[in-house]
Image (cartoon, helix red, strand yellow):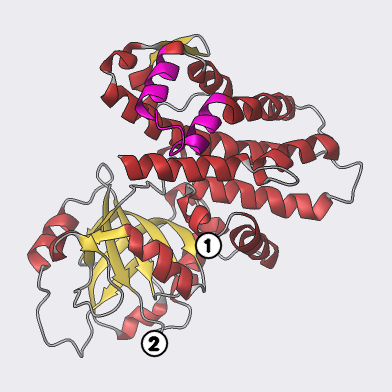
Amino acid sequence: MKNLLVLYNPYYNQEVIEDHIRILNEQPNANEAKVAFGKVDSKRKDYEHMFGKEVNALLDTVSTQNPLQLFLTDFSSMYVCYIEKVTKELEGVKAPKYYDDLNVDRWFVVSDIREITRNDFEFVRDNVITSFTTPDYGSYTYALYGNRYDYPLRIEQKNPINYFEEFSEGERHFMNVFKSDRHASAQHDLMHYVFGKELIYEMHPDTLESITTAEVEYMQYRDNKTHNFSSIVINYGKSFENEMYYFLRLLFEKLMAFDEKLKSIEYQVQSRNFTLEMYLCNKPNMGTNKFLLANSDIYGAYTELYSDRRKYASLLSLLKFNLKSAIYPIQQIRNEASHGGAISKKECDEVRNIILGIGESSILSEILKCKMVVCEES
């Protein structure tokens, strides 16, 4: 998916993002909800966009079959929109009223908006925009200071993330933008006191969403001994399963490049046959990952590729022991919760302790750190 970055200016409206979210939320069918985001042509601008032809060529390709990820920022917050159409005219799509007095150059038809971070300039500066490169400016990392960028700005992600993977399945995120103070507080605590900003940004956004949701509910009910903690365990389990998959997908891709014979390794998921090469685009269940990690050919490949035991001690420990030992208890309790079983706080704490590292090493932190090691070696 192509990516574009646009700066939004609170000078025009103090609630730019909020006004667009309101329109999306007003529409009865979330899957058909749309709002127009306008690229305002500033009256103060007295020069042509240096790469206007390249940007226009990109915008002309946007369609339902070829959507665009539009990143919106004021450098304090960062949002990303799912764009299926770019047009000069509104064509029946509703837009906030404040555009009535502005000269809009183009309308981006937004079908979904996802919040990356809000009111955290340091995080945007140090973690988010540093993950972008600028193909029209030598493909260098985005530079906040001293740049001469023209917007909209074509960007590429160093580690590509599709923020809307389940869009075609009906998943929408705009209803969850500007969440409760509890949600913001839980995410702040995870960022500052559990994982740290660096590891939080290494997480896939779905992982962060699941683990934050789990923490909010856990804190709400932790003193209620009769509460069924099933939904909390399911969300903790999602965060683990999701991050484990993205780590192993990266690892297996590198191992298959090292030894092409690994591509033909077979496994089954719900009576369907797969090969390791198909793993890259098919997320399996937890048990499958445990099965693959026990495969002698995969074991031989990663122990040979990462043979420097001093350098890769943490990675080898995770693959040989820690990941497999974490899968079993999480899988057992998560499966019970998924099939309607009542989960006690004690069982929930067991899963939470393993994932967050309460009184022990955090398996999620280990995965994220080792994913960074594999990325660096790619």
Residue 90 makes an appearance in the image: no
Question: Percent from the top left, x then y, of residue 325?
Answer: 65, 26
Residue at mark 2 to residue at mark 1: CA–CA distance: 25 Å
The front one of 144 and 37 is 144
Quickly name the residue at label 1. Answer: 26
Amino acid of disc 1 = Glu
Badge 1 element: helix
Answer left or right for 133 relative to 128: left
Residue at 67% x, 24% y is 328
Q: Residue at x 33, y 40 (%)?
A: 377
Mark 2 or mark 1, which has the lower sequence index?
2
> Which segment is the magenta one?
297-320
Contact check, label 2 and label 1, Cβ < 8 Å: no
From the viewer's perspective, is residue 80 above or below residue 267? below
Which residue type carries mark 2? Tyr
Image height check: is 310 above or below 140? above
Q: Picture coordinates of residue 160 (x, y %)?
A: 33, 47
Circle 2 residues within 10 Å: few <14, some 14–19, many ≥20: few
| One can see residue 128 in this view | yes
Q: Which residue is mark 2?
A: 11
Q: Is residue 298 magenta?
A: yes
